[in-house]
Every structure is written in C-alpha cells, then in structure tokens.
Amino acid sequence: MDMRWNLDVLYPSFDSPELQKDWDKLCSEMKELKAWSKEHLHGQNDAVEKMETYITKLTSVLQTQSRLYSYAELTASVDAKNERALQLVERIQEQAVELVEPGVLFQQWLGALSGLDSLISQSPLLETHRFFLTETAEKAKYMLSEKEEIILAKMKNTGSNAWAKLQELLTSTLLVDITVDGEAKQLPLTVVRNMAYEKDPQVRRKAYEAELAAYKKIEESSAACLNGIKGEVITTVKLRGYQSALDKTLQDSRMDKETLDAMLTAMRESLPVFHKYYRTKAKLLGHANGLPFYDLFAPVGEADMRFTYQEARDFIVKHFGSFSEKLANYAARAFDNRWIDAEPREGKRGGAFCYNLHVVKESRIMSNFTGSYNDVSTLAHELGHGYHGECLVDEAFLNSDYPLPIAETASIFCETIIAKAALQQATEEEAFAILENDISGAGQVIVDIYSRYLFESELFKRRENGSLPVSELKAIMLQAQKEAYGDGLDHEFLHPYMWVCKPHYYYADYNFYNFPYAFGLLFAKGLYAEYLKRGASFVEQYDQLLAVTGKMNIADVAAIMDVDVRSADFWRGSLALIAEDVETFVSLAASRS
C-alpha cells in the first residue's frame, strides 16, 4: 500500500491554475468583506439582513482560505524545506490579518445589538448559526480597538508565528547521532524517538541517550522560541482583560473552571494507581528503582506484535466494524484513497495528527508508522479525529470548529474500540501486550499530561518576571515529572527536554494544550461504558453528539448523554475503569514472575 497521501483533491500543484484562481478569489472576497463591513456595520437597522450577509461572506472567505492553507500546511508538514509550501503558508498568514478589521467591526457591532436572541429567531440562517452569534457577542468584551487588533495580528506574524515556525524547523530537521548495529549514523529525530518501542532494551536506552544529547544542539534556540511565544501570550491576555492564559484557554474551550477542577481532582487521586503500574512494569523489565524514562514504552511480553501497513489497515477496519459500519467504511476510505501519510522520512514532522478538510468533506492523517502495535493504535486515534470530521460534514462551516477538550473524544473512543476488540480474539500473550499498551497510553494521557499541565502552569508563572534559561526550563520539567510520576519512575532517568520535543507548547493560540487530552480520554472511557450498557442504540446518539460539538459548550454536549462533567464522580468513574485494567495487569504480571 502507498504510505504517502494524495492532496490532489485540494490542488494538483503549487503552479496549478486552480490554486491561483482560489488565491485571486480569496483576495477579492477579503477586500469585498472589508469594504462591506466598513459601510454597513453600524446602527441597529436591518440587523437580521446584515448578520446574514456577514455570515455568508465570511463563510466563503474562510472556505477558500481553508483550502489554500490546508494544502500548504499539509505539504510542509511532510516536507519541512518545501519553499513553495512555506511561502504560501506565510502569504496566507499575512493576508489573514485582513480578516481582523471586519471581524472586530462585526464583533463590536454585534455586542452592542439589543434583542439579539429575538433577531436570530427571525432567520433560518441565523438560527443555524445561533451559537456562533451568541458566543461572538459574549466575547466582544475582550476585543481591543480596531487599530490595536490589526497591529496585534500583524505583529503576531513576525512574533509567535515566526517563533513557532523556527521551532518546527529545528525539530523536523534535527539529525541524531547514533550507532546502529555497529555503524555510526545520523537519523531523523522521529525515527530515533520511535526506537522507544523497540524490543531490544539496549536499542531503547541508546536511542534515549542519543535523543537527549541531540537536543543540546537546539536547546538554546528552542528556549528562545518558547520564551518568545509565552511572553507574547502573557502580554495579549492582559491587554484583553482575561485573568490569565488558562482563563482564556477555558473560555476558548467552552469549558468552565469547575469542570477542570473536578477532572484534575480525580486525576490527582488516581496517580497512585498508575505508580503501581509503572513499578510493576519496571520489575518485569528488571529495574529495581522504578521505570527509567527510556523504558516507558518498552513492549512487555513475548508477543512481538508487528504489523505491515496493510495488516494495520485490515485490523483497524475490521474492529471498527464491531462498533458501526459507518466507522469502518470511513476508515477503509481513508486508507484506500490515500488520505494517510504514514512513512517516516527526513524533513517530516514528528508525531501524528489529523486535519479535517470540511471544505472537501474529507480528512488527511499524518503519522510515522514503523509497524508497532502502538503505531496501529495511533492510526486508530487519528482516524477517530477524522470520523469526528465525517460526522460534521453536513454542518455549516462555522459550526464545524469544535473546542480542544471535546476534540479528543472520538479519537480516544476509537483507540478503546481497537484495544477492547483486539483483546477478545488475542492469545493470552497478545492480550497481555495489548492490555499493557492500553494502560501505557492511558498513563501518557493522565500522568504525563498532568506533568505537562504542571510544567506549563509554572512556566507561565515564572515567565511573568522574564525569560527562563535552558537550565530553569529543564529543572521545571524534571520537577513536574517527579510530582506526576512519583515513585513509578526512576528519578535518575527522566526526560528534561520534553518541552523541546512536544510542539503543543509552541502554539500561541492554544495554551495548555494538555488537559484536553485527559478530558478526551476520560470522557471517551465514560461514553464507552455507556456503549457497553446500551449497545446499538448508543451508536446513532454518539454520532449526533459529535455532530453538535461545534455549536454547544462542553457541559451541554455532555448533557446529551446525561453526563455531568462538573462532578468529580463522573471522572472517578472513568478512572475506575483504568484502575481495573491496572489490577488485571498487576495480577497477570505476578503470574509471570
């Protein structure tokens, strides 16, 4: 099977007439939207017609912009030195500043409208966009003046956006010096990080040591990027009147502090369960002082679960079919129509992501597939994101953008389907490996994510007083890992550079891009428990839940399934499912010793 994606549905090339035509269309429509907004967005007369016109014009601009940007960004993600892609990304980011002025004018005008609720009721188009309109009006209080907003947007392109591009270039082009089979090599960072899943313990440790040594080449540059981005965030959130970066993130996430606190409380309570798992795994691997970081992802058991790409495809499609035919068909289309770029190679971004292309009713998935079961699980995770997009294709474009915490629900639900279905037909040895892999993944999303939350909280606190040197960033990361992992890890072998290799810290618009993963895991686990109770009747309601995630706040989305996310008990219930798996793992591990 071809392991590189096809982007022709967007454009055949950067020289294509279609791309140039869309660029011209974008420039023209952007200019028209700006002129119309200046002329009409004042006074309360003809308010319904003005809202309808603005939504129609804005949607057209954003759809064209999305198509162009997706093509450039997806190309650059697998070819970091592609100059045409990088240039187009930059052109679009610079041109997107033109949207600021009409956006500010509309938001200020909308925020001042009286009787918005009744006005929306007068139009089917406005009723469709009710959530978008009311949310926009509510956030008007955080808007600066038109002139200030434009200046901030323009400065952002030479500020945080530029820092983020540099960081991505640094990590995607970093070559790691490592000896493999007696031969000195320089390998891409993604390849070396994937060695953490290798069966040979010497390979895992050697890869870990080589990885940490390689970061010294880019640590100062990465620290400059991180300080620059977080400094800008602190400045802008204060200017806008938010209490903090976390306050802004929660509002952008359509989530309240009560929900976050309830979830974090349950997570902290659950840490000893994970510590027990890590200590048990450490003993299985022959470690006396807890698990060294380089063995966090070590395969456990004799079952060497390796997959070809074709086998991974068949495995996922088959098991998705145990949940629903629609989900299985979606996954089959993604594989068979080359929506996935799975081949690791130099110049390609690390990790994995899914990019939903609402404008063409498809999605594109990037991963770095090397054949491990974890890689199969990762593909299932990203296909879950894609399926979420599939459930939104008939929604209005402005209703297709859902908040980060709910974004991880479908992906982790799909991971759970794969793990549970595979367990049912696995041999005892394979079942042990699958169970361990599932718990390991949960540990990353609960324990490691908690360490990242602690790190970013402390980073923002200290960045208020000035830039942090590399030594301080490393110390904060190590302390966060010690607090989250406790005695589960060997404190002599932690990972002081996790702030370099995780791109999430470098998204100026998405701070605290950590707790949404925990929300997604635990919300998905809770939903999966409901699925086991209700069976086939659950499936249709689940699809409906995914379809409304772009036009409701999180508490209301959860309420569709009669879930109270502000109650710590809900989160405790989900964590109890993981605790049961840990006890099973500990029991099985004891029988092996």
Image (cartoon, rainbow, N blue to C red):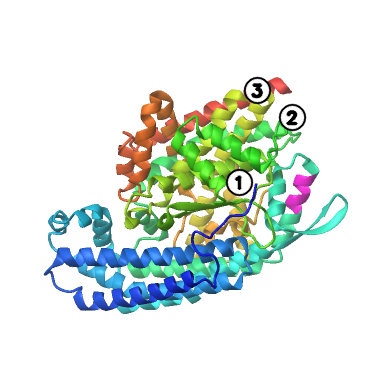
Region of the chain picked out in magenta, as a range: 203-209
Classify residue 532 as left or right of residue 197. left
The percent coordinates of residue 357 (x first, y second) are: 45, 56
Question: CB atoms at circles 2 and 3 under 8 Å apart?
Answer: no
Which image quadrant for residue 510?
Answer: bottom left
Q: Residue at x 35, y 72 (%)?
A: 99
Q: Residue at x 63, y 22 (%)?
A: 587
| Residue 294 makes an appearance in the image | yes
Closer to the N terminus: mark 1 or mark 2? 2
Query: Closer to the camera: disc 3 or disc 1?
Result: 3
Query: Closer to the camera: disc 2 or disc 3?
Result: 2
What's the residue type where badge 2 is placed?
Glu
The percent coordinates of residue 254 (x first, y second) are: 34, 51
What's the residue type where badge 3 is placed?
Leu
Q: From the viewer's side, name the closer residue of 79 and 277.
A: 79
Give me the disc on residue 482: 1
What's the residue type where badge 1 is placed?
Lys
Q: Is residue 71 magenta?
A: no
Establish if 471 lies above or below 104: above
Q: CA distance from mark 1 to mark 2?
A: 30 Å
Residue with the mark numbered 3: 588
The percent coordinates of residue 550 (x first, y second) are: 34, 51
| Residue 153 makes an appearance in the image | no
